[in-house]
Amino acid sequence: MAVTSFLKRRSADLVSWLQAGPMMLVFVLFFLLPLAFVIMVSFWDYNEYEMIPTLTTRGYTETFEGCIAQMPELCTILKTYLKTLKLCFLVWLLTLLIGFTVAYFLAFHVQSKTWQIALSLICTIPFWTSNVIRMIAWIPLLGRNGLVNQGLISAGVIKQPLEWLLFSEFAVVLALVHLFTFFMVVPIFNSMIRIDKRLIEAAYDAGATGWQTLWNVIIPLAKPGMVIGSIFVITIVMGDFVTIGVMGGQQIAAAGKIIEVRLNALQFPAAAANAVILLGVTFLIIASLSRLVDVRKEL
Amino acid sequence: MTDNSKSSAGLSRRTLLKGAAGVAGLAAGSGAITGFPYVKSAEPKVLRYLGTAVNQADDITKKLFADTGIKLEYITATTDDVTKRVITQPNSYDVLDTEYFSLKKLIPSGNILPLDAKKIKEFNNITPVFTKGELPNGKKIGDQGTAPKKVMFLEGSNSTKFASSVTEWVTLIPTVYNADTLGIRPDLIKRPISSWSELLNPEFKGKASILNIPSIGIMDAAMVVEAAGIHKYADKGNMTKAEIDLTIKTLIDAKKSGQFRAFWKDFNESVNLMASGETVIQSMWSPAVTKVRSMGIPCVFQPLKEGYRSWASGFCVSKGVSGQKLEWAYEFVNWFLSGWAGAYLNRQGYYSAVLSTAKANMEPYEWAYWMEGKAAEKDIKAPDGSLLEKAGAVRDGGSYDDRMGSVACWNAVMDENDYMVRKWNEFIAA
């Protein structure tokens, strides 16, 4: 008896290993291994045209160059991260607010399934063209001689065109929110649609106002979606340099941009060191987010 | 005729194969896999050509194929990516088209095969701008930065050391070069511009732009610093750390006071900025000015009293190329210098390496407009037939001798490149 149950357990183990195996293999090959290489290379030395596999912390020390000497003024890397974090926070806040509202509307105000699907599809329209085209489309709209400025001038609201509409932090945040709100809508909608409608009725019957229901019933239950959406948006924005480059007129520093400049100058170890730093920072943010909600438990 | 049809059938089939089997399939497998018994005679001559879009045109591949039977497969990348690819994937191309300043990175990597000058038919007719750093009339031109003559020759066929004088071993066969300056919108500036220092003139606050490619942008900045009388460099193309600090500080001060509207990184960005009136003065490339002008918007490639920042590119061959393929590469280079391609490039506002053969392939009125700085006798058309300038127009900056004779410095990779790149990041973050 004992032997059969042991064998049974062994074969059950084997089956679950086999089931997890392909995913694990992909994960190791295409994520862990490259990541290990990046970390390894970040400790190498380099010259104008090649990487030199000797252990050095040059990539890191030079990245933080001047951070102590320049105090109290911030050094390049801290300034860059501060800017990136600020943009990231603004984009996260706006996408969360807008995404939550859109998802709420879709989940609770739209009754028919067909309409829910149709409206969700409409949300994907911005994704029908490429990222670059979506960004470039803002330029004739927001530029010095763009539609918005022309409209405001002819309406008599302003006399001089507004310069801060384009190539500014405003433009960057606008474009990023436009690009990534959808990544919030989907997971939040997914959480909301699974909320038992009877809970809302119960809250109503118990005399809760609309806001109380929202705050005490819907938001706690939609939290996993909000956290998942936040993880999407934060990881993308932290690493972005294309949107920030185009919409910020290349004048706004970004953590991703530093990596790109280093790569283009063939300074791979320095780029790798910066990538490791960025990864670390992003990981910290995600880790603290997932302390708020145990995503796995809630799914 | 029959031979032709066979080779073209083989071609399409081989193009398919290439996708699947890649390089090896192309070189080794063409006989074995396709199974053509006569494949040797019908073998299409294919060269994979890595470079920026500057020299890559359908017209050139078509004409080349018609003249020599060589088929070019373009691999297009940005300047930085071309360099990256040469260093990391030297077997992914046959012919490389790159800029002279990249050679300081490429040659030590050992991935480049120097070409034998004796096999280049027109070699002795290549303009002395490259070989000696002077105009055909003997006038010396500026050699700050990575001037081509400094990096054009190697000490031997296997050497990775640049020779100080002319040798038989050539790193890059020059193809195209130009002298760059600031582009301006005369209709919005409404006064003459004659100095690089105008780029940081507060009059153009919020309407100026500079190139966000560190190794080129720093040179434009150096022209400005020198023109403004802030500092005189011993060599703008090879600054000391203190000079880099000073140059970047000047840029940062300007950025903080709101001088720049945006920085640009590729051709189309620079065209958009200028055409939309977001900027009125900025670093620019000649064909970008032409493009703005062809949209009906006035734009001038303004000659400035301090001179031009010049660049040059050329061909070389990957270390992995040998045998038959190397012969095709020489055949291609010889064809390129034989005039048709040179005339094609000259008509776009670039300059070609062998002036005599290009001249023979251009109409006299074209040559007079593009190269001699004379007023156009007839309408000037681009190679694709579109109108560039009406009769009577004069080229910005004038003749070849006037423009190339006023070169002050060349695009460069500095000894302190690593430090410069870090400081450039500081400028962007400021």
Image: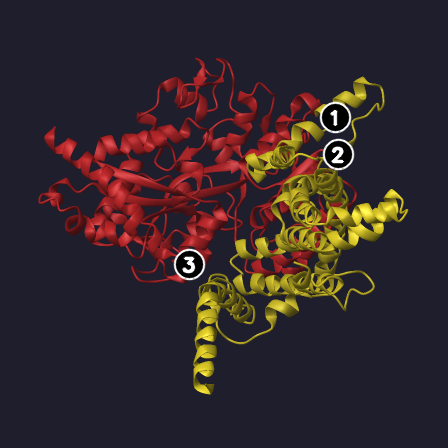
Chain colours: A yellow, B red
Subunit of label 2: A
Amino acid tagged 2: Leu
Amino acid tagged 1: Val
Q: Are marks 1 and 2 on the same chain?
A: yes
Q: Which residue is denoted by mark 1 in the rendering?
A: A148
Measuring from the top left, give residue B43's x and y in whole percent. 17, 42
Measuring from the top left, give residue B303's x and y in whole percent. 58, 31
* Residue found at x 29% / y 57%: B320
Q: Are marks 3 and 1 on the same chain?
A: no
The answer to whether one can see residue B132 in this image is no
Subunit of label 1: A
Residue A110 picture quarter: top right
* Residue found at x 70% / y 65%: A287
Measuring from the top left, give residue A229's x and y in whole percent. 68, 51
Q: Which residue is denoted by mark 2 in the rendering?
A: A165
**Element type where label 2 sits in the image:** helix
Q: CA distance from mark 2 to mark 3?
A: 41 Å
**Image check: B323 left or right of B342?**
left
Count numbered badges in the picture.
3
Q: Which residue is denoted by mark 3 in the rendering?
A: B88
Q: Nearer the viewer, residue A272 or B203?
A: A272
Amino acid tagged 3: Thr
**Element type where label 3 sits in the image:** helix
